[in-house]
Amino acid sequence: MKKSVLTNVVRRKVELTNLQKLLFPGVGIIEIEGFVEDADLHPMLYDSPLLVGPDDPIAAKPYSLLREALSSSDKLGIGRIVMRDKEEVVAISPQDDGLVLFKLQNPVSLRKISDMSDERNEEVSKPELELAKTLVSIMSTTLGDLELTDRYHEAVKQMIQIKVEGKEVVAVADEEESIIDITAALKQSIEQAKSMRSPGTKKPAKKRAKKAKSTTKKPRKARKIA
């Protein structure tokens, strides 16, 4: 796959500096090291997805051949590529008529589940499990039917608009944590989920917390898999 040009999901080309070209003559070229089963890569290893394609007619044939070979063998290509002053280990997977490249996390940098608190092993009763499974069943849908808009981005836009209008941005007080009756909470969630699945029922608008007028933002935990 010589002379492969990487683009991200919005088709923005990777720009190479003279320093990159000097230190890494093969920058921008994917070097495939081998092929593995999909099951060999733990989901926690996957990072940013990128679209990859040939940048000239000469590269089109090996590109198409690799895509068809991966599709028919159910394998993933494992390789290396220099991006942004760093050599990345990547996985290459076929998708529709093209290829998708996933940057891979370094396995050494990943935390083990065993490093977490023992609180994760709280005993679960059979009735509680049955209620949880019922809730999962009722809430089962397709990814395309889920409303997964960037609520943080929308909240920032809302805050900016409030400031533009000369209004004060008021902080919403955090709710105090309390001991939860898990059985009662599950039953309530099941009833809510049932009502949301009823024909003609629209999802209620979720309340958005407005930021305080202080310029110091409270950090939020990032949902990251590494």
Image (tube, rainbow, N blue to C red):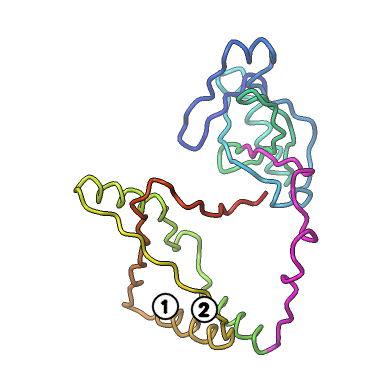
Q: Could you tell me the amino acid type at mark 1?
A: Arg
| Residue at x 35% of width, y 58% of height | 210
Describe the element under mark 1 as helix, strand or loop. helix
Place of residue 225 in the rendered image (x, y in percent of width and height, measured from the top left): 65, 51
Place of residue 30 in the rendered image (x, y in percent of width and height, measured from the top left): 68, 26
Q: Could you tell me the amino acid type at mark 2?
A: Ile
Q: Which residues are magenta?
A: 101-126
Give the labeled residue for mark 2. Answer: 138
| Residue at x 36% of width, y 67% of height | 206
Q: Nearer the viewer, residue 204 or 97?
A: 204
Q: Is residue 192 above or below residue 116?
A: below
Residue 109 figure quarter: top right
| Residue at x 75% of width, y 73% of height | 121
Q: Is residue 181 above or below residue 166?
A: below
Q: Nearer the viewer, residue 22 or 112?
A: 112
Q: Could you say which disc has been placed on residue 197 in the image?
A: 1
Judge from the rendering whether residue 9 lies leftward or rightward of residue 113; answer left or right. Answer: left
Place of residue 6 in the rendered image (x, y in percent of width and height, measured from the top left): 57, 28
Place of residue 84 in the rendered image (x, y in percent of width and height, measured from the top left): 60, 25
| Residue at x 67% of width, y 20% of height | 2
Verify CB contact (< 8 Å) between mark 1 and mark 2: yes
